[in-house]
Amino acid sequence: MIQTVLGNIEPSKLGKTLAHEHFILDLDWVRKDGYSYIFDVEEVIPEIKQMMAQGIESAFEVSTIDMKRDVNKLKEISLKTGLNIVCSTGYYLSEYHPEWLNKASEEEIAEVYIKELTSGIDGSDIKAGLIAEIASSPKEFVGNEKKILKAAGIASKKTGFAVSTHTGRVNAIETIETLLNEGVNPDKIIIGHQDLIDDHEYHLSLLKYGVNIAFDTCGKTVYMKDEVRALNALKLVEKGYEDHLLLSNDVSRHTYFTSFGKKGYLAVMDSVVPLMREYGIKEEIINKFLIDNPARIVNNPLVKE
Ligand SMILES: [Zn+2]
């Protein structure tokens, strides 16, 4: 079963799914730029409704504890829109980490994840269905970042839930090997933000471990053109890796919304998927990226009913 904020659903009920989104988060408490947040349910709902009008039925909401994740608001959003939302447990980059992580063991951090996956979050009965987005800094693992990753491995191995990461090029192999060393099933690993790296051979070097990668910053054309994302997806399909790719937009601030004249949560379906079709990727393969792969990875056979 797949654990959503409204309870468990069969994998076949997930439908088209974005694998790395944020509907409620606060990065501004660290960045202090005045716009890196999404607080307002009534502001995000019209954006989600537009996304659902494109055929999206589900999303993995990867906001972490230290991004000020709010599962009650996610539940309200799900109730008001009908979107299936899988929420997450985890910690983000070092500068967001709470003090207590300094003294905590990997096992103690894993206990927090396990509690949120198996009994509930913030005193509610809402459970996380994913361990995400477990981050490492661009150049190296900083502070407690290795510890929160190992803890994710421990929790995944114990509970069967998938781990999704925020990973740059330098740390990718180390991230994968750390999780595998903790006994995580490689198919329960999603290495995030890999569309930001325009290097097919590098993508193959990750996929040979049996893990999944996410092209999850679709529409952020300041960092990478959507044409490059679609082309790199095609190259992976040609090598037979269509079962290991996921798509998303990673909207991390309300100023990316359509109400600010931006693409909001629409870039995957409005820009990248049409480019994929244009480059000859078949509909059934696009449906693997959007339907089959997310459902398979986040389905946890250990969760019954
Ligand atoms: Zn993110």
Image: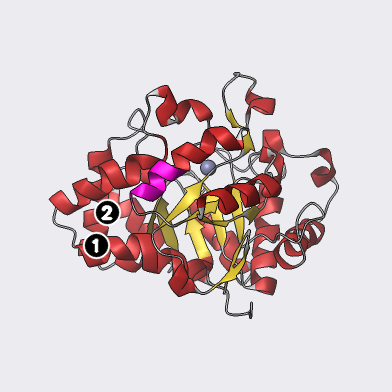
Q: Residue at x 27, y 39 (%)?
A: 226
Residue type marked 2:
Ala
Residue 175 at x, y percent in the picture? 55, 55
The residue sitting at 61% across, 45% down in the picture is 63
Pick the front one: 137 or 253: 253
Q: Is residue 140 above or below residue 282?
A: above
Mark 2, residue position? 233
For the residues marked 2 and 1, what is the alpha-carbon distance in whole angstroms? 6 Å
Q: Nearer the viewer, residue 60 or 209?
A: 60
Q: Which mark is residue 108?
A: none
- Corner quadrant of residue 117: bottom right
> Badge 1, how many Cα within 10 Å: few under 14, some, many 20+?
some
Residue 66, visible in the rendered structure = yes
Per the rendered image, the range of residues in magenta is 49-54
Would you call the spot at circle 2 few (<14 residues within 10 Å), some (14-19), or many (20 or more)? Answer: many
Quadrant holding the C terminus: bottom right
Q: Magenta span has 52?
A: yes
Q: Is residue 227 magenta?
A: no
Residue 283 x/y as whole percent: 21, 62
| Residue 135 screen position, x and y as percent | 59, 45
- Would you say 167 lies left or right of 287 here? right
Image quadrant where residue 131 sits? bottom right
Residue that badge 1 annotates: 237
Task: Specify whether residue 196 is in view.
Answer: no
Image quarter (top left, top right, bottom left or bottom right) of the N terminus: bottom right
